[in-house]
Amino acid sequence: MFCIDDLMSELHFYINQELQNSGKPHIEAETYPYAEGETYWIDADRERLQQVFVILLDNAVKYIERGFIVFGYFAGETNVIDFFVDDTRFTRMRKYDDEDLSIARGLLEQMGSQLIGQQHKYVGSSFSFAVEGATKFVEIASQ
């Protein structure tokens, strides 16, 4: 079991380094804001989950020329976490690396999930997947 916010912080650092190394410091990368006072943990394979995110983020960095990249998760009342990676490429056709996406799909299938991708003409793309095993912890403010 691991803290999802810790993983998101590591990935945020990673993508900013990749944007710098790729000569694209003008591209903004943001993580979706989390609910203040709530921490989500998940009983899942951290390494596989991180690998899926790295594949999707690398793909976004590889093809984006302007716009921004947003990634993160949504948590509801169930034990399922919905993860996503969105980018605004402002290009006519979405490019992506089929081989890398096949690897991501395979990793997610091993985790009992599936990769859902959407292309938005002239806007960008979205990838999402859901993983079970979440637990929410709420911080109690001391008085």
Image (cartoon, rainbow, N blue to C red):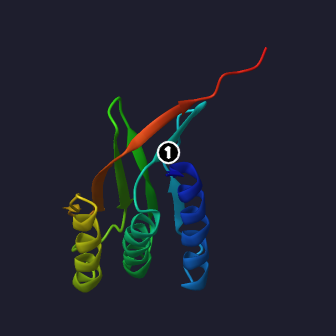
Q: Which residue is drawn at 51% across and 53% down?
A: 31
- Give the residue at mark 1: 41
Q: Is residue 140 above or below residue 97?
A: above
Please identify the quarter of the rendering in which residue 118 is found. bottom left
What amino acid type is highlighted by mark number 1? Trp
Asked whether, in this view, residue 30 is left or right of residue 54, the answer is right
The x, y position of residue 112, in whole percent, is 23, 58
Foreground residue, 16 or 44?
Answer: 44
Foreground residue, 24 or 57?
Answer: 57
User: Can residue 26 be seen?
Assistant: no
Q: Which residue is drawn at 41% across and 48% down?
A: 73
The x, y position of residue 104, in whole percent, is 29, 73
Asked whether, in this view, residue 20 is left or right of residue 51, the answer is right
Residue placed furthest toward the top: 143
The x, y position of residue 101, in whole percent, is 26, 76
User: Can residue 60 be seen?
Assistant: yes
Q: Which residue is drawn at 27% across and 83% down?
A: 97
